[in-house]
Amino acid sequence: MKTDSFRGRDWITDLEYTKEELETILNVAFDLKRKFAVGEPHELLKSKTLFMIFYNQSLRTRNSFEAGMTQLGGHAHFLDPSKIYSPALVGMEKAYSTERVSDVARTLSRMGHGIAIRCYGEPVEWVYGKADYMIREFAHWASIPVINMEDDIYHPCQGMADIMTMMEKLGDLRGKKFVMSWAYSPSVEKPLAVPHSAISVASKFGMNIVLAHPKGLELDDNVLDAVRENVRKYGGSFEISNDMAEAFQGADVVYPKAWTSKWNIPPFSPKPDLEKTQQLFDANKHWICDSSMMRNAKPDAVYMHCLPCDRGFEVTDEVIDGPQSVVFDQAENRLHVQKAIMALTMR
């Protein structure tokens, strides 16, 4: 169990952590969940402060971090960029409305113990990787840990909650079939972060991973290469399918969720063309997780979604509210894994 490599460290992507370090986070998360269940105090960050900067709206992320800091004995400050001098990269400053990331990061570092940021999509003009770059700029200038609450490439907190939930439901994950599938949504404004982190975390635990999506909705090649390397190192398998029903065959876990097309946003495209992505989405409305689709998986297969889901499009009510759904276990586990990450990095 690795314990000596966390203090003061940033949490931007799980890919920058070893399998042993991820196992440590999960061990701590399970222990904190037990303490939470029996009402045992665990004020590991007493009187410490987390600054949370949200460029995007949030239900689960904001409340799990705020509740988590309270339970750890500290306090989380909610910072709405529209209500403060919004952090901006060099050359993007606007008089009387923005402040350089370098200045914000150094200021907050003098006042608290961690900075958590959520940013993707419209706030960075749908330029893929720009939000991740900004969070890394914060990490460069801050002298306290920076935590990624979801950017345009990674959502590592969700990925850890996902793997924790799968461990609770399936036990040993080695050899279990995990299907990360695209599913139709009327909204194209969906970052690639959730599927990236879901498969990258799973690839360190020996799972047989199938990534399913229509053509034109490919994920980041760098992430896919990292997944392949992890599979080579830790076992399991990885394949890509363009057939949802085929991918679901014999699955232990299915995770159908929409994400946008990278090909229609910069730098893959000269400018964002969400209308073109909408046409691609609309051509694949049959990619929905309903009871018929679930019958392709194992009878006891687990249905997962990070939420919020687009009911009636990504999934039917009978599936998400049915006995195979573990979506609210996932939501709760965000609290426990994030508490573990904060306790380890901010102590």
Image: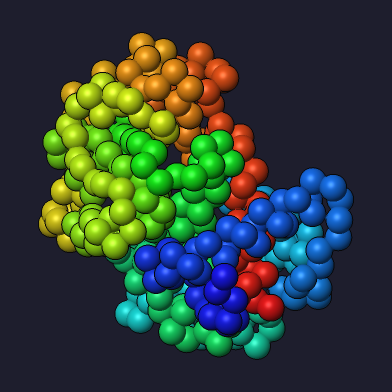
Residue 27 position in % (x across, y down):
62, 60
Above/below status of 231 relative to 300: below
The number of discs equals 0
Left of 331 or right of it: where is 221?
A: left
Q: Residue at left 79%, top 46%?
A: 37
Left of 16 or right of it: where is 277?
A: left
Left of 155 or right of it: where is 64?
A: right
Instruction: Name the image quarter holding the N terminus.
Output: bottom right
Q: Residue at left 17%, top 61%?
A: 267
Above/below status of 101 relative to 190: below
Residue 304 position in % (x across, y down):
47, 34
Q: Is residue 334 visible?
A: yes
Residue 299, quarter of picture = top left
Left of 136 or right of it: where is 262?
A: left
Residue 98 position in % (x across, y down):
48, 74
Colour mapping: rainbow
Instruction: Name the image quarter holding the C terminus.
Output: bottom right
Q: Is residue 101 visible?
A: no
Of residues 106 and 48, the one drawn nearer to the viewer in this rendering: 48
Single out the residue that lies furthest toward the top: 292
Q: Residue at left 16%, top 48%?
A: 263
Residue 252, quarter of picture = top left
Above/below status of 64 relative to 97: above
Residue 214 position in % (x across, y down):
19, 32
Q: Residue at left 52%, top 23%?
A: 324
Of residues 298 and 288, the one drawn nearer to the viewer in this rendering: 298
